[in-house]
Amino acid sequence: MRIIAGEFRGRKLLPPEGDVTRPITDRVKQSLFDILTPLLPEARVYDCFAGTGSMGLESLSRGAAHATFFEADRGGLTRLRRNIDTLGCVDQTRVIPGDLFRWFAAASNDPKPDARANLIFLDPPYRFLREQPEKLRELAANMARSHLAPKGIMIFRHDARDVLELPPLERYDVREYGGMTLEFLRNQETLNDEH
């Protein structure tokens, strides 16, 4: 695993241990970030189910101002923190350990409007879509309502065989790579304003 472009280009990241996380391939990451490049300068990024932090750290390398990482697995947290330290970007990051469902449900964690995320990576373990779809819908609704900037976007990664609507977010683009789908989502109001 490595950073593909930007300030930290070529720097290696500690990979995940075992099969707790499914790292995105360099080819898919390159394709995704080619699309996201115009949105990244000075962006605030949430990397949810972050694993070792590949998506948030790539965003920082390409000009994002800040990344918040959400991870519950202890081994993943250790490697995530080491990757942040290795790249020397501690001041641009925040790591939130534990249950992100509970964290996003707490209104006390809602940011001020100018501190909302411009980009949210939502990359839950694939089993969540099959076993806990309602929890994911509630999570996405909490994010959309209080954490996503008005013109912000969410990238929802999941198994291509699965389908899950996440209102009030609406899909405006979909990319498929082998057995994986990347959905690009925005708040309904944003899409309505553009048409």
Image (tube, grey):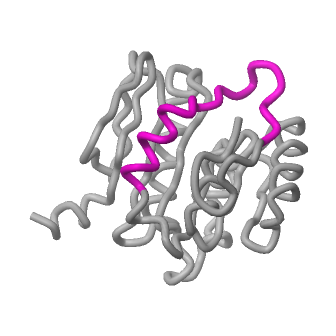
Looking at the image, residue 4 lies above or below residue 60: above
| 120 or 37: nearer the viewer | 37
Tell me if residue 28 is in the magenta stretch.
yes
Q: Residue at x 43, y 43 (%)?
A: 32
Using the rendered view, name the quadrant where residue 182 is placed: top left
| 79 or 193: nearer the viewer | 79
Residue 133 rendering spot, x and y as whole percentages:
49, 31
What count of labels does the image hold?
Answer: 0
Using the rendered view, name the quadrant where residue 176 is placed: top left
Residue 34 rendering spot, x and y as whole percentages:
40, 49
Q: Residue at x 78, y 66 (%)?
A: 89
Using the rendered view, name the quadrant where residue 77 is placed: top right
Quadrant (top left, top right, bottom left, bottom right) of the C terminus: bottom left
**Is 31 displayed left or right of 15 in the figure?**
left
Residue 22 rendering spot, x and y as whole percentages:
65, 26
Q: Residue furthest front?
A: 10
**Is 144 displayed left or right of 106 in the figure?**
left
Q: Residue at x 69, y 57 (%)?
A: 8
Quadrant (top left, top right, bottom left, bottom right) of the N terminus: top right
Q: Residue at x 36, y 72 (%)?
A: 150
Stretch in magenta = 13-36
Tell me if residue 21 is in the magenta stretch.
yes
Residue 68 rendering spot, x and y as whole percentages:
68, 61
